[in-house]
Image (cartoon, rainbow, N blue to C red):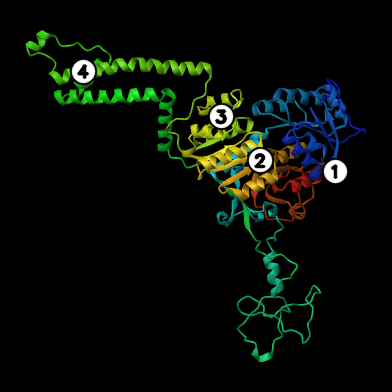
Amino acid sequence: MTSEGWGTPPVEPISQHYIVCGGNALAHRLVLELVEHYEVPVVVLVTDRTRDHAPQIEQITGVAAVVEYPNLTEEALRAVSIDTARGLALVEGSDQDNIHAALSAQGHNPDIRIVFRMFNQRLGENIERLLRNGAALSGSATAAPAFAAAALGRPNSVEIDGRHLHIAFDDAISSDRICVVADHIDRQDLSKIRLLPEQEGDSAQFVRLAREFGDDGPVRQGGLRRAPEPEPEVGSDSEGEPERGREPAVGPEVEPEVERAVEPDPGTEPEEPPGGIAALQALRMEPREPISWVRRLRWRVLDTMRFLTNARLRVVLLIALAAVLMAFAVLWYLNRDFGWTVYISLLDLAGAAQPDQQADIAAGTGTGGLWQRVAQVVITICGITFAPVATAIAVEVLGSGRRGLPRNPSAGTRDHVIVVGLGNVGTRVATQLHEMGVPVVCMERDPQARGISAVRALGIPVVLGDGPFEEQLRRARLKHSRAVIALSGDDATNLEAALEARHGNPDVRVVVRLFDDDFAGHFYRTLDNAASRSVSYLAAPAFAAALMGSEVRGTLSVFRHVLLIAELTVEDGSGLIGLNRHDLEDPGGVRVIAARFARSNQLHWGFADRTRRLAPGDRIVVAATRSGLARLNTVLVEEV
């Protein structure tokens, strides 16, 4: 590492560039987004050029410079030419460091666009008000819904104006789908997936019919044109290529009922693409996890018992309770008065019952005979047992609360999701699942992890320790879990946790956080009932779009690919003015799914008018690939 205050400035003066501060996985993905899809000059500021992803960032073609400074100081900002930069992305460091750097950058360049990562979203919203042109994003909040949805085996959704957009696959696609978003889906080779493939327009079928039933085309009842009579010699089709596969017809031997469709051009692709397909659909309400209140109540009661007592105390309490109930039954049988039986039993439990005297027994005025006295003695002894147990429970609860110790999962934990790793992402995922009513158990090896206190405040059990995953997962009750989500920052650790989970419970669903795409490809080919997600891959497009001034409402996952749902505003001087739906969608990678015009606040879904041109004040909602949204953002900042 360089000495304090020294760095490696750019070789040549640079302007109108974008600065990325950080050397982590998110910074790596963000630089790739800016260089490959937006094609803008990028300068990267890292704390150490030999650590994390900094060496890989230096190898990216198109990066103007990689500058090394141990701290994000005023001198470091000047070294990356903050005064002439167009945008600044702060994707590493604490919330406090990013706030300080954002305010310092605005002091150097008031017009610069600033996007900074913040875990505390509420604080980020307040800081946005202090900046002239800034946006606070949370990478963990952007990626967490995709992990939670994958664990539950249902698609993630993005809420737009009261509707929840999600990805449906194959047989789950309904007739009211918005658009096809992917085809050629093959789990054995995810590289074949095509996002937002070129598709026929709404009028394509009518154009085919017009060609089929044109003036020169013979029409037969049934809707298909008969194959034309061939020439005596082999001719050419309309494209100038020889016709193949057509046998010369010999007058009367041709059966009049046989009809043949015109063969497609060999160079065209079939209408039905091979492999699975995925489509974008809208629901009117967010699909909730179907967990009955009976299951939740049972889980809560058993978990509360486990929280208040340990195994030995539970055995003592159960034996004492059984003895009290038997003694109560004896008293009721002898006296046949339920109210009096309850009264005397409570007194005996409290140790306030008055024993019979010998004179009372001799006079025949005792309480009811030998068996009643035995029952009262049993109740009294059990009452003496309950007092120290109750005291031990109170001490344990109060002591654990003062020490801040998380609780272990109870013996009644069932159908839960195990979250491995309580970093930023793990904490978000655990919180979201808990809010959905899904039982959650967390695992963490670092007792100082920031997420432990957050999940403890929600009452979520946490298994602490640095032992082998097999033992930790057993304590987390893997046998009774529905899914395991591995969310540590290391791919190898996450894969180890997933494989141990599958070994301990072959039916459990595993969701793994993986950065490396090749690693993820092998993962999909090896394991069934599994999913892989990358936090940086999900969050980087949103950061890049925000840096360019677009509002990304959410990201949807198609396996390892990302579909962006963004809302764009047509402002004065924007390059979007005068464009229509055909202009926006023609190059591919973009689908206009809704529009809100300046004259009306209503959002029109599936807007079919492809000729209506955009005017200042209009807003459009698009589903786009990374390159497609980059193209729109490039148009967005252009002058008319």
Q: Secondary structure at mark 4?
A: helix
Mark 1 = which residue? Answer: 639
Distance between the alpha carbons at the discs numbered 2 and 4: 65 Å
- Reading the chain from its start, which is encountered first: label 2 or label 4? 4
Q: Which residue is mark 2?
A: 514
* Element type at mark 2: loop
Q: CA distance from mark 4 to mark 3?
A: 50 Å
Residue 84 seen from this side: yes
- Residue tagged by mark 3? 467
Taking the view exactly as shown, the residue that stands out farthest to the bottom is 252
Which badge, 4 or 3, comes first in the chain's sequence?
A: 4
Question: Looking at the rendered structure, which numbered label has been put on residue 376?
Answer: 4
Sequence order check: which comes first, mark 1 or mark 2? 2
Residue sitting at the far left: 363
Q: State the CA–CA distance, disc 1 to disc 3.
A: 60 Å
**Screen quadrant of the C terminus:** top right
In-image side of 627 versus 377 (left or right): right
Badge 3: residue crowd in 10 Å (few <14, some 14–19, many ≥20): few
Which circle, 1 or 4, is nearer the viewer? Answer: 4
